[in-house]
Amino acid sequence: MSTTPLKVAVTGAAGQIGYSLLFRLASGALGDRPIELRLLEIEPALKTLEGVVMELDDCAFPNLAGIEIGHEAEKVFDGVNLALLVGARPRGPGMERGDLLEANGAIFTAQGKALNAVAADDVRIGVTGNPANTNALIAMTNAPDVPQSRFSALTRLDHNRAISQLAAKTGAPVTDITHMTIWGNHSATQYPDLFHAQVAGRNAAETVGDQDWLENTFIPTVAKRGAAIIDARGSSSAASAASATIDAARDWLHGSADDDWVSMAVVSDGSYGVPEGLISSFPVTTRDGDWEIVQGLEIDDFSRARIDASVAELAEERDAVAKLGLI
Ligand code: NAD
Ligand code: LMR
């Protein structure tokens, strides 16, 4: 075990996701290695964050080697090995999508520049804050010295949701569900793919044998799960989003399971017809902190149309932020 602390930045640390994420990180969810937390918030939220830090202290986590908090990205990100960008501006009353992209654009432009200037050479950056794919694109574009492969956006929550729905439908334990893929955007246009997924080694679509369920129940349930949770809870998913953020970071740093893959939104190299440079979700394998898009999957017309629709939305978001001068 390395005794050098892993320096992990979390933005939006006083928010809902932060309240779950920080305790999971500090209690060893990324492995048995000391961890130093670097927590970024906007100035008005620092008092709340101080309270969260008191609680972290009160847990006496053996591997928690230190905590720093602040509102200046260049100070907080100094030397970080992993940056989990969770904080984002939620859509307020009367805000159009363009306003949301602009408000978040300002955040992710500044954070991309700060990471470029002060993060460790081995930094990995995972974006959870919405619109996650486009926020990651903005941060990546504003960090020209950080390799593009070090940026990803979170679609692991969608991936986990898809596994859970398929397990419930088939009666299989979640551990029997493998090779799940979310394609495209972390939005209602995403495409959860059962044609390559497996249930206990058998093709999932064939095992289910119910195209109507696949098309009219499974896909919309997974794609609109975030909205269903907002409807039920009155606020967006938090503990499950934190859990997925951890799953994604852990697999990125330590490797995905042999003979399986995970979903991550990463910069496209043109694979599967996704335009180069877009941050889109793919099936990926990870090893030693690097990822690779799984190649050679056959994409039928049904899947093609759905991947294309989600990717078209990503291209629109990219064009909108380009117009705003953010990339
Ligand atoms: P929240 O509103 O409870 O917390 C967000 C925090 O970010 C707030 O404390 C706020 O002060 C902070 N913040 C705002 N601007 C900041 C900045 N410039 N620097 C640092 N901190 C800043 O929200 P939440 O429930 O924790 O969700 C956070 C984000 O995650 C939202 O954008 C949400 O839509 C998104 N989300 C994504 C997924 C996913 O799967 N990708 C799932 C759930 C939620
Ligand atoms: C989720 O998938 O739960 C969130 O991205 C929903 C949201 O809009 O915050």
Image: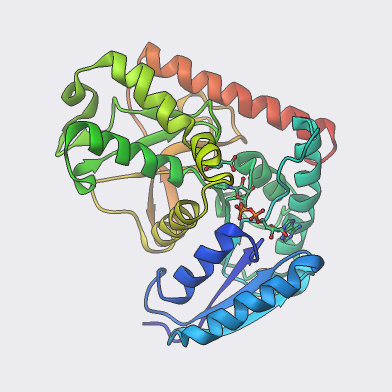
User: What colouring does the structure picture have?
Assistant: rainbow
The percent position of residue 174, horizontal first and vertical second, equals: 24, 46
Residue that appears at 27% across and 45% down? 260
Number of numbered discs visible in the structure rendering:
0
Residue situated in front as seen by the camera: 256 or 147: 256
Vertical placement of 88 versus 229: above or below?
Answer: below
**Quarter occupied by the C terminus:** top right
Q: Quarter of the image containing the N terminus?
A: bottom left
The residue lying toward the viewer, choosing from 73 and 23, is 23
Q: Is residue 58 left or right of residue 213?
A: right
In the visual, does 295 lie left or right of 323?
Answer: left
Query: In the figure, 229 relative to 46: above or below?
Result: above
Quadrant of ligand 2 in image: top right
Q: Residue 152: percent from the left, percent from the top?
A: 55, 49
Q: Kindly identify the residue that appears in the image at 48 percent across and 76 percent down.
A: 26
Task: Kindly tell me whether residue 105 is visible in this rendering.
Answer: yes
Residue 196 quadrant: top left
Query: Residue 268: in sight, yes or no?
Result: no
Observer-nearest residue: 167 or 193? 167
197 above or below 252? above
